[in-house]
Image (cartoon, rainbow, N blue to C red):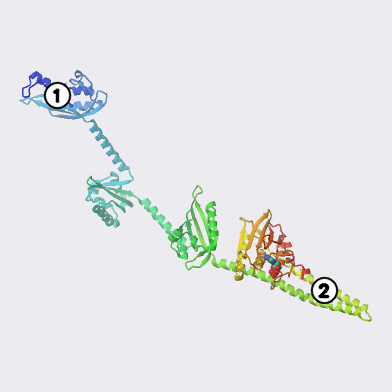
Amino acid sequence: MSTMAKDEPIPADDQSLFFRQIVDSSTELLHTARPDGYLDFFNQTWLDFTGVPLEKLLGWGWTCRIHPDDVEAFVQKMRESFAKGRPFQEASRVRRADGVYRWMLHRKVPRFDGDGNLIKWHGSSIDIDDRKRAEEQLRKSERELRTLIDVMPAYVGTSLPDGTVDFLSQSWLDYFGQTREEAMGWGWAGVIHPDDVDRVLANWQAGLASGEPVEQELRCRRADGVYHWFLHRSLPLRDDEGKIVERYGILFDVNSLKETEHALQIREHELVDIIETIPAMLWSASPTGEPTHLSQRFLEYIGVPFEETVDRGWEGLIHPDDREETAKAFSRAIETGESFSAILRLRRADGEYRWQKARGEPLCDPHGKIIQWYGLSIDIDEGKRAEDHLRDTRIKLAKASRLATVAELAGSIAHELNQPLMSILANAQAAKRWLNSAQSNLTEVNSSIERTIRDARAADERMQHIRALFKQESFVKKDVNIPDIIREVVRVVQEDPKKRDVPIECHFDESLPAVPVDQIQVQQVFINLIVNAIEALEGQQMAPLVTLRAAVTDSDRMLIQVIDNGPGVHDPERIFDAFMTTKEKGMGIGLAVSRSIVDAHGGRLWAESNKAGGAIFNVTLPLSHTGPTMAQTKNMREPDPSAL
Ligand code: ADP
């Protein structure tokens, strides 16, 4: 072709070759057919595509390259077109040289001569496989989406930007019993509960106006006429410019959730009513002890908003003296997962601290992990104060009555012995006079001595009588916690302002076992020992200090020590004698009585000097009921009358 001049006509042979070259080099798949449909030409592109020589495709040979599923319908349509002389267009799968079938769109147009006779068919085919597959994929996705929409436990629809509904899923129509025609536009609003319809439409319009998503709850009538609660959500779909082109809406049936929620609300109200009616203050706390809820009664009692207790913790509400013990008890419960129990003073809204009995129980998951603490606190203030008062009074009374008893005893002994002693004295003097007189009268001497013996015997009898009185004493032993009763003694002693200046330190071993004692009697021993220690420190140069210790020394004994840094004791035995005192107003009875109490418990009381200065008073008590029996304890050791 390059040899041809620009405007020169191409010779006929060259022309045919020229067009043949164009046709063969075309990317189009071209072919021609005779008027009867016999395909008489395929261009080279076709031959390359199928990988089949021309002679095998000519006539109807090409049908072997059409997909077996398509060939029948395809040939049928083609024959119809040929018969009518009308253009033909049809898609079919054609087998490529590599064996892969590809979708092709085939077109054939008839060519007529000047007389209108059909002389030829010209055809072309284009590969539409990618497009066809994309379309198929799209259709598949759409089918899947529709199926999904219909099987979803939700009812879906779309609406135009003005709010008129243009699509509702089949499940929507079935569920609400509307036909598509009824529901389209605004017909769907007919299923909304009359009480909700205004609110729902107002929200819907507001969402349309603002272009914002809409979320609301509403009641809709189902096909069976029953109203159910639904959650309605609607989202706008925007185009690339941000213009709303559609809104998607979905309804979820939340009726059972609503019913459960309603039932739970009723239950919650009932529980809150119960909690608020119980005459106790209820609380709950996190696994680590932070408050999570306080009943109204509790909040009113403390007069502090709940948030404040969360921010500041419990501590500020508890009496400073009880904080450490309470915190320890709660920490122990948290560590071990055991119940929490404490008696503490809690600050009331008016600032008064009142005694409370607090208890807490852990709620655990199936693996035993604590998920919450639940507890209550009961005001036991009146009872506790009455009990404390009673105990204090009993201790004081016990001490007073013992002193009174001993004082009375001393008086009565003096009284009882006075008369026989006077008589003994008179008779002894008479006997002396008779012996010393000029005419000594032995008969008189003898009778005076007789009377002396008689009176001495009478004195002895009275002493026996007094001893018998002591033997009436009895007491009852009960297991008690020694540190607790000693702390109580310290509190009672320190109630006396004169004794408050001396610090008292307690060092009690952890987890001491209970000891069977008569609490009042033993408390009296410690009152005597502690008061003595404080009195021994009066006027001392050194900073006074009383230390109390309790420990188990061997398997069956507890040793309790009262230690002071006073002047110490010079004669550690004599101080236990009755009426032995170095104090101006002392009676010298305390230690004697204390020792007799300790002895009666099967224990020992002795004094020793502290190497560091001061005195140590030791009390041992048996741990189990191995001491004297009830019968034996009736025979308390009485002060030795010889000391009187
Ligand atoms: P009172 O206290 O009435 O004197 P007690 O029998 O209790 O009678 O004490 C007898 C004496 O023992 C006291 O007067 C005192 O001399 C001595 N005593 C007691 N306790 C101590 C002590 N901790 N330190 C020094 N002396 C003590």
Question: First in sequence: mark 1 or mark 2?
Answer: 1
- For disc 2, the marked residue is 458
Residue at (67%, 69%) from the top-left corner? 399
Percent of width and height locating residue 330: 53, 56
Residue 279 appears left or right of 86: right
Taking depth in this image into account, of 66 and 630 the one nearest to the observer is 630
SS assignment at label 1: helix
Which of the 4 image quarters holds residue 453?
A: bottom right
Which of the 4 image quarters holds residue 292?
A: bottom left
Q: How many neighbours does mark 2 have within 10 angstroms: few (below 14), some (14-19), or many (20 or more)?
A: some
Residue 345 appears left or right of 256: right
Res. 623 visible in picture: no
Residue 588 appears left or right of 199: right
Res. 97 visible in picture: yes
Q: Quadrant of the C terminus?
A: bottom right
Taking depth in this image into account, of 101 and 97 the one nearest to the observer is 97
Q: Is residue 614 above or below residue 254?
A: below
- For disc 1, the marked residue is 22
> What amino acid is found at the position of numbered circle 2 in the picture?
Ala
Q: Farthest front residue?
A: 541
Q: Which mark is residue 293?
A: none
